[in-house]
């Protein structure tokens, strides 16, 4: 009944009623502006947010508990009939809640001045849980492992000092861990693996930092500890340290001790230790002992490195036949590399292609390629050792090596060996044999064909057979149009035909294919220089100088271009850099002397010309300048020495002997001058200048030969006039023009013995008029009229022919071009 009555008072909410309505309603009566509330602001400033206390009243229920006064005068609230305190009454210092349910975070015991802190933040963080001693030791072990890992990572990045510091810290922490284990009575739980790792890492870091005594001490501590199994293998590391210290006997001792502690089941490990022993014997020069160890390796576990070292030992011992046997073993060593066909997708499946692309360049594939490249290098080098270039049986020995390689797994190396044979013939100046070998590559694959044609083009270019050079340059370009050496050779063949614009185009194309092709860049600068495009030529050689910092040829070309541009100071600056690289180059010193002379600095010019003459006393223009300089300085005796030297170099040039005689006459040695003129007349009997001065000297000295010389002088002058008339009548004849400039008088080809059309200076042609043939008004006049009998030097382009790039070539990637430093 009670239940039914109570349920009658329960009303179910209609579906359309909102159970949560009314909560957001706001009564504006409760609104107050706290900022303008003076009492609230005063409470905030004075009592930290508490309002002034309500006077005398206790908040309570409707009944309210009235306080009573005890006999002592204190107030006591009335208790209920059941003995519980009145709601809101204070009893024993604790205020009872005003309701039966206590609000979260509310306490009636708050006193004045305490802040509201429902989350209990004022009590601070909770105290940490205390770890057990075993857990602390585990954390310490984890820290030690972390230090070891950090040490290894630092070593891998090259920071050896940090790696050593981490290893030392790990060692200290490990010692502390062992001590704590012993103190806690858990010595049986000591982690021996951790101890071994710490000590081994510390020894390794000492070794990497080249602290060999400390490393040996650490290794010895590990080896002597019987609790470490297989620690004897570390004697190999100790042997390595002794090898670095060149203490070879101790190194062999420790290698053998380590070898004794390794069972025969570990063949690879034993093979490596035996190889280390053989290397030490090689360093000691005991090739017989090294051969014994290496032969043992090749009979049990053959490998490429041991086979190559065995050939080297046989070569050092001079046993050619055993070298051949070892070579056969070397080419039969299996590399253990899978077939390249595995990188070819079996079908057009996209996923399989992605997998193949992923594994094609991974670290394992890179290791396989490195191993194969090293094997090919060892085999090629071994073949070169077996058949040295200077041996009489070079060709037959090389053919034997090629046949052996063709029958092995390294068939592709046969072409490289044949190519090397051609290059060896080329270095021996056996061009015919080299051409025969290279021509066999015309039917090979495009790469080899292009390389062979490039070298053939170079050979014909050196032999000045430019048509054949052009033919093979085209062949090389057709086989590989992106071959920069072939394009350079093609440009060279066009360059010698003086088609500099077209040559520059080929050089530019070569540079587009290989921006570091220094030959093309050098020749492009020469082409621009011939086209008088000096700014472009300067730009080319400056770029080349950035690549070839110490190239004297490049710096000389820069100096020459600056001289052509009229900037002599820059030219001198670059030539001084050339002198720093090649201080004994007489041609550069002469060039410096010329530039200083043009600048008017005679003292510096004299210094550099003298240095050039000291290093190369046969350069005729240097001798001429020095002789004229000393004549101008009135040092005739010193000038005589230089003209005597010029006479020895060019005995058919009468002007040097005339200058020598003039020096004797100027110095007052008339008798020596007369003898010199007589000697000149004997060699050049129709020379008018010599006869003129013989007449003068004979007259002054009162000699009887005056009339004889005067008669000869008249005849020579008549013959000179006849020749001059013939020259005038035959203008346009090249031969006549050459004779006109040859001697100034009767110095013809048949009388002087000169067939090169040499001509004397303008000053010396006027000897009969001025009667002072030996005094030049200026050195510039002599220089301007002098012509080198060998003709001007041709500035040939640098050839771009190269040998095929071969890392194992003893001679490197040799450039077979010409030296372009002007002479």
Image (tube, grey):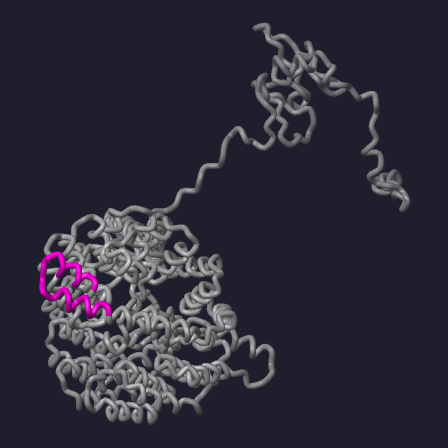
User: What residue is at 34 percent from the left and 59 percent from the top?
Assistant: 784
User: What residue is at 79 percent from the left and 21 percent from the top?
Assistant: 31
Q: Observer-nearest residue: 305 or 542? A: 542
State which region is magenta.
692-714
Q: Observer-nearest residue: 20 or 503? A: 503
Residue 1 is at least partly visible in this image = no
Q: Up-down: is 373 above or below 620?
A: below
Instruction: Please tell me whether the stretch drawn in magenta is mainly helix, strand or loop.
Output: helix
Residue 544 occupies which quadrant of the picture? bottom left
Query: x, y percentage for residue 121?
Result: 55, 31
Query: x, y percentage for residue 32?
Result: 78, 19
Q: Up-down: is 504 above or below 41?
A: below
Residue 255 is at least partly visible in this image = yes
| Callout count | 0
116 horizontally vs 267: left or right = right
Query: x, y percentage for residue 257?
Result: 14, 71
Q: Is residue 694 magenta?
A: yes
Residue 347 occupies which quadrant of the picture? bottom right
Q: Observer-nearest residue: 417 or 745? A: 745
Quarter of the image where the N terminus is located: top right
């Amino acid at each position: 009944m009670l239940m039914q009555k109570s349920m009658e008072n329960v009303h179910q909410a209609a579906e359309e009623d909102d159970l949560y309505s009314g909560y957001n309603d706001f009564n504006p009566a409760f609104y107050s502006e706290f900022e303008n509330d003076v009492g609230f602001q005063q409470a905030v400033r004075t009592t930290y947010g508490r309002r002034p206390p309500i006077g005398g009243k206790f908040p309570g229920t409707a009944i309210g508990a009235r306080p009573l006064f005890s006999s002592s005068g204190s107030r006591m609230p009335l208790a209920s009939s059941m003995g519980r305190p009145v709601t809101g009454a204070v009893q024993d210092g604790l205020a009872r809640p005003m309701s039966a349910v206590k609000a979260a975070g509310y306490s009636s015991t708050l006193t004045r001045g305490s802040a509201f802190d429902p989350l209990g933040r004022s009590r601070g963080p909770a105290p940490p849980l205390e770890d057990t001693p075993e857990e602390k030791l585990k954390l310490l072990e984890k820290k030690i492992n972390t230090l070891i890992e950090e040490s290894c990572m630092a070593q891998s990045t090259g920071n050896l000092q940090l790696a050593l510091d981490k290893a030392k810290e790990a060692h200290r922490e490990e010692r502390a861990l062992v001590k704590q284990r012993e103190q806690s009575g858990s010595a049986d739980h000591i982690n021996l693996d951790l101890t071994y790792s710490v000590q081994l890492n510390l020894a390794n870091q000492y070794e990497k930092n080249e602290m060999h005594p400390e490393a040996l001490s650490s290794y010895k501590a590990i080896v002597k500890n019987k609790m470490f199994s297989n620690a004897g293998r570390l004697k190999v590391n100790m042997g390595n340290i002794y090898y670095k210290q060149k203490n070879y006997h101790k190194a062999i001792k420790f290698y053998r001790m380590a070898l004794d502690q390794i069972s025969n089941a570990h063949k690879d490990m034993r093979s490596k230790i035996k190889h280390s022993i053989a290397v030490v014997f090689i360093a000691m020069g005991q090739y017989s002992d090294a051969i014994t160890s290496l032969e043992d390796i090749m009979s049990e576990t053959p490998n490429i490195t041991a086979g190559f070292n065995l050939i080297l030992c046989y070569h050092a011992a001079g046993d050619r036949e055993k070298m051949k046997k070892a070579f056969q073993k070397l080419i039969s060593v299996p590399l253990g590399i899978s077939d390249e066909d595995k990188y070819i997708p079996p079908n057009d499946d996209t996923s399989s292609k992605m997998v193949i692309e992923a594994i094609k360049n991974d670290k394992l594939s890179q290791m396989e390629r490195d191993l194969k490249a090293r094997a090919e290098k060892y085999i090629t080098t071994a073949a070169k050792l077996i058949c040295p270039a200077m041996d009489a049986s070079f060709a037959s020995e090389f053919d034997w090596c090629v046949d052996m390689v063709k029958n092995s797994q390294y068939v592709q190396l046969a072409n490289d060996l044949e190519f090397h044979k051609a290059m060896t013939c080329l270095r021996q100046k056996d061009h015919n044999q080299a051409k025969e070998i290279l021509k066999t590559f015309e039917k090979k694959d495009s790469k080899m064909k292009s390389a062979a044609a490039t070298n053939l083009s170079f050979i014909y270019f050196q032999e000045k057979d430019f048509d054949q050079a052009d033919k093979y340059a085209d062949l090389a370009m057709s086989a590989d149009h992106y071959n920069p050496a072939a394009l350079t050779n093609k440009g060279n063949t066009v360059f010698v035909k003086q088609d500099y614009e077209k040559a520059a185009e080929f050089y530019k194309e070569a540079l587009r294919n290989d921006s570091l092709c220094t030959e093309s860049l050098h020749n492009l600068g020469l082409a621009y220089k011939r086209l008088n495009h000096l700014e472009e030529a300067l730009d080319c050689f400056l770029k080349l100088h950035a690549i070839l910092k110490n190239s004297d040829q490049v710096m000389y070309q820069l100096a020459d271009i600056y001289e052509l541009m009229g900037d002599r100071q820059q030219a001198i600056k670059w030539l001084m850099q050339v002198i720093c690289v090649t201080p004994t180059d007489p041609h550069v010193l002469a060039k410096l002397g010329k530039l200083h002379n043009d600048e008017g600095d005679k003292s510096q010019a004299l210094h550099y010309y003298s240095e050039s003459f000291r290093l190369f006393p046969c350069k005729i223009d240097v001798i001429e300048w020095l002789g004229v300089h000393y004549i101008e300085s009135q040092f005739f005796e010193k000038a005589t020495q230089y003209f005597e030297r010029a006479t020895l170099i060019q005995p058919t040039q009468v002007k040097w002997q005339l200058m020598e005689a003039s020096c004797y006459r100027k110095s007052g040695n008339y008798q020596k001058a007369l003898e010199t003129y007589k000697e000149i007349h004997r060699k050049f009997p129709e020379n008018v200048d010599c006869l003129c001065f013989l007449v003068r000297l004979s007259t002054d000295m009162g000699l009887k030969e005056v009339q004889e010389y005067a008669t000869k002088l008249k005849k020579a002058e008549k013959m000179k006039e006849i020749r001059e008339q013939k020259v005038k009548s035959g203008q346009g004849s090249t031969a006549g023009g050459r004779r006109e400039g040859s001697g100034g008088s009767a110095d013809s080809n048949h009388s002087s013995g000169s067939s090169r059309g040499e001509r004397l200076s303008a000053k010396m042609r006027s000897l009969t008029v001025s009667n002072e043939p030996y005094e030049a008004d200026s050195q510039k006049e002599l220089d301007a009229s002098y012509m080198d009998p060998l003709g001007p030097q041709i500035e040939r382009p640098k050839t771009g022919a190269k040998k095929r790039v071969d890392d194992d070539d003893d001679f490197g990637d040799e450039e077979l071009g010409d030296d372009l430093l002007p002479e």
